[in-house]
Structure formats: C-alpha cells, structure tokens
Image (spheres, rainbow, N blue to C red):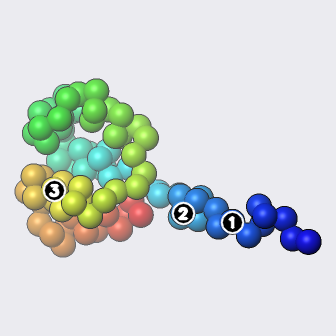
Amino acid sequence: MQSLRTGIIPSYRHLAPYPKDNLYRRLRMTLHLTQRRAATVFGISLGQWCYRERSKRLYSLQEIVTLQEVSGISLSDFMKIVKECA
C-alpha cells in the first residue's frame, strides 16, 4: 500500500524556482537610495525595509503594483526589474 505522505502535494513554495534577486533591493539600487531613504519614500519603517530586502522572495500582485506606483519608474522599466528578480 502506498504511503499517505507520497500522495500529499508539497508546499507550492518548494516548487517555485528560487528568485535571482530581491525586488526591494534591486529597486533601491535602481533608484540609488539608502535603506533608510527607501523606507521613508515607500512609507515603511527601516526595520521592515531591511527585513523585506533580506528575506522577501514571494510578492503579491498588489505589492508589485504599489512598488511600481510609488517608485515612479515607468512600467516597462519596472517590468524589466521584476523579470530580472524572478
């Protein structure tokens, strides 16, 4: 009899390819901002920004749209950054 564990689909996070870079870090580098200035511009605390640069790997659509709108980068340039990070 087949084990119950082999029939369970693993978490989707384990199936996703590991991203090449962090979107928050790449965006900050593109805008030539310090972490402190980036946190201020995007309206979050420095600690939150540092955490997102260090560990964030999956992004919601709402988060991506908000980052693009607040950054002021054109949509085509922003999508190049997203593709580089994915």
User: Image check: 14 left or right of 75?
Assistant: right
Label 1 vs label 2, nearer the camera: 1
Q: In which image quadrant can residue 58 be found?
A: bottom left
Drawn side of residue 60 relative to residue 2, left or right: left
Q: Quadrant of the C terminus?
A: bottom left
Mark 3 neighbour density, 10 Å: few (under 14) some (14–19) many (20 or more): few
The x and y percentages for residue 40 are 11, 33
Q: Nearer the viewer, residue 5 or 72?
A: 5
Whole-percent x, y for residue 71 in the image: 12, 52
Q: Amino acid type of disc 2?
A: Tyr
Q: Return the residue at label 1.
A: 8
Residue at 64% from the left image edge and 62% from the top image edge: 10
| 37 shown above or below 27 | above
Residue at left 32%, top 44%?
25
The residues bearing labels 3 and 2 have C-alpha atoms spaced at a distance of 24 Å
Question: Dot 3 corresponds to which residue?
Answer: 66
Mark with earlier residue (3, 2): 2
Residue 22 versus residue 80 in the image, above or below: above
Determine whether the residue tagged by mark 2 lies in a helix, strand or loop. helix
- The answer for how far apart the CA atoms under marks 1 and 2 are is 12 Å
Quadrant in the picture for residue 14: bottom right
- Image side of residue 10 versus residue 16, left or right: right
Going by the numbered disc 3, the residue's amino acid type is Thr
